[in-house]
Image (cartoon, rainbow, N blue to C red):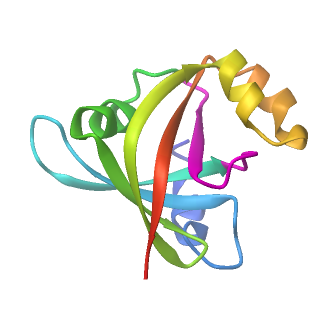
Amino acid sequence: MNATAPVARALAGRRWVPLWALIRHRGRRSGTAYETPIAVVPTTDSSIVMIGLPFGATTNWARNVVAAGGASLRWKGRDVELGHPRIVDGAEAERLARAPFRPVLKRFPAAIVFERRVIE
């Protein structure tokens, strides 16, 4: 990820790059503000946002947003408020994802699912 992070960060959140987004969160102990480039997984339910966790549920940003109860997302040129995060296993993530993305999610140990609310 370190080698691709600058490219992902430059593209993340842009209106014309719908896969990449920037998740904004705070450190659970330090309170430091962070922006992490992530890939949003299209789901069958537009009221939720799902992010695959290829390195598992113990990544710092995932632990931060679960501890905080939410985060904000810069996605498709808009700010989206995310709430009620929950970690799901690969099988549930596969079930929630749109068909073309299911084979990829099948390989991930976990995903994080949020309820979303668009901020205008």
Query: Is 70 positioned to the left or the right of 22 in the image?
Result: left
Quadrant for the N terminus, please. top right
Per the rendered image, the range of residues in magenta is: 41-55
Where residue 109 sits, quadrant-wise, is top right
Q: Residue at x 45, y 63 (%)?
A: 117
Q: Nearer the viewer, residue 43 or 27?
A: 43
Who's the residue at 32% across and 30% down the image?
63
The residue shown at (69%, 59%) is 19
**Residue 67, horizontal then vertical, whole percent:** 24, 32
In this view, the residue farthest toward the right is 100
Q: Position of residue 75 (x, y in %)?
A: 55, 67
Quarter of the image with the C terminus in it? bottom left
Q: Indicate the position of residue 9 as horizontal and vertical percent values.
A: 51, 63
Q: As drawn, is 82 to the left or to the right of 97?
A: left
* Residue 53 x, y percent position in the rendering: 56, 30
User: Is residue 50 rendered to the left or right of residue 63?
Assistant: right
